[in-house]
Amino acid sequence: MSIIEVKDLVKEFVVVRKKTGLAGAVRSLVMPDKKIVKGVDGLSFNIEQGDIVGYIGPNGAGKSTTIKMLTGILHPTSGSIQVCGLSPQKERKAVVRQLGVVFGQRTQLYWDLRLGETFELLKRIYRIEDKKFKHTLDMLNDVLRIQDFIDTPVRQLSLGQRMRGDLAASMIHEPSVLFLDEPTIGLDADAKHAIRQFIKTMNRERRMTVFLTTHDLDDVEQLCSRLLVVNHGHIVEEGPLDTIVNKLAPSRLLVIELSEESQAPEHLRAQLVRQEGLKLWYQFDKAGITAAELIADLSGKLPIRDLSVQEPDIEDAIREVYRTTG
Ligand SMILES: Nc1ncnc2c1ncn2[C@@H]1O[C@H](COP(=O)(O)OP(=O)(O)OP(=O)(O)O)[C@@H](O)[C@H]1O
């Protein structure tokens, strides 16, 4: 059984269009002009335990709406969700014990409490015994280095410290699934690195399943074993990042620098697309020939001084998915 199962999920929001002016306001009250907005529209996917899945899509694609339904905050209009074999809507209390949730744009911490007091409060809410609590906090401190600011009120924490505090708080009750909605947004390079290390460690050592939404493709590259690309509320691509990029942008470039001027040879499975002075660019498809084979073929015919292989741009490939499914 998959740890998360989503089938034919739909979430409709009713939006009332406001009319302008006093007469318009009165008319809106008597006869509201209602419009249905589909936040999620026929969404289906499964996630296996221990996966780190990147859930990506353009603005307004339905990512946050999905996370809110998976964590029981929102009720679907139709369709079914199972998380750890439970319904987040019907068995919310039991599901919440299994989940950690972090929203990068909004803290879950108590603004007026010190970070350590927040952890104490969560300990009581989840009824965690002293020994286990101390053990988990020590482990979280090892990875997230929260000890330095554990006595600081949450309102005074920097964004990076707050984010580490949020992640620690989401892990206090040792959940089996962690939902992260843009966990690295606005963070500097060091803080991003720390958060990514934390996610990798929790996944490796505790087999924790991670469901991650992000607009930062470095998060995706460094963390995710699998991607779900959502657009207009349903899945438009899925699979490992490499597979998606290879499918959309199969060409690579071999850039060769010559030691002396030479006639560039033709090649059956690569195309000479550019030549400038001592520099040559050959375009080739990974499925047709490997870079090693092409280099071996050309090195006998050309005086090569230096070379490099340019992989396709991941952002371009992902933008292409959004464009073609938009
Ligand atoms: N409470 C709401 N009332 C009305 N419409 C909503 C509501 N919440 C979301 N929507 C609409 O549902 C769609 C999906 O929104 P959602 O916030 O899930 O997108 P997202 O993929 O998380 O976007 P972003 O990357 O910008 O955060 C959008 O069209 C949005 O306007």
Image (cartoon, helix red, strand yellow):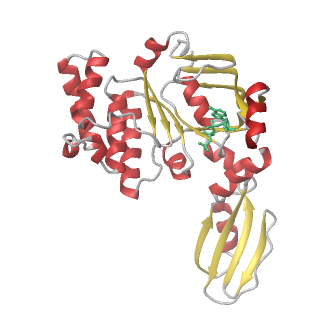
Q: Is residue 97 above or below residue 115?
A: above
Q: In this view, does 124 lie to the left or right of 221?
A: left
Depth check, front residue: 324 or 170: 170
The N terminus, quarter of image: top right
Q: In this view, does 57 lie above or below 38?
A: below
Q: Where is residue 241 in the image (x, y as percent from the top left)?
A: 61, 45
Q: In this view, does 131 lie to the left or right of 103?
A: left
Q: Where is residue 62 in the image (x, y as percent from the top left)?
A: 65, 35
Depth check, front residue: 191 or 151: 151
The C terminus, quarter of image: top right
Q: Total number of numbered labels?
A: 0
At a point 27% along the width and 35% down the height, the residue shown is: 140
Q: Position of residue 58 (x, y in %)?
A: 66, 46
Question: In this orientation, does residue 36 appear?
Answer: no
Q: Is residue 58 above or below residue 9?
A: below
Q: In this view, does 78 lie to the left or right of 189?
A: right
Task: Place residue 143 in its image quadrant.
Answer: top left
Question: In this orientation, does residue 243 appear?
Answer: yes
Q: Position of residue 204 (x, y in %)?
A: 39, 34
Picture quarter with ligand 1 = top right
Question: Which residue occupies the extreme top position in the image?
Answer: 90
At a point 54% along the width and 51% down the height, the residue shown is: 216
Depth check, front residue: 205 or 292: 205
At a point 28% along the width and 36% down the height, the residue shown is: 112
Question: Which residue occupies the extreme front position in the image?
Answer: 22
At a point 79% along the width and 48% down the height, the residue shown is: 324
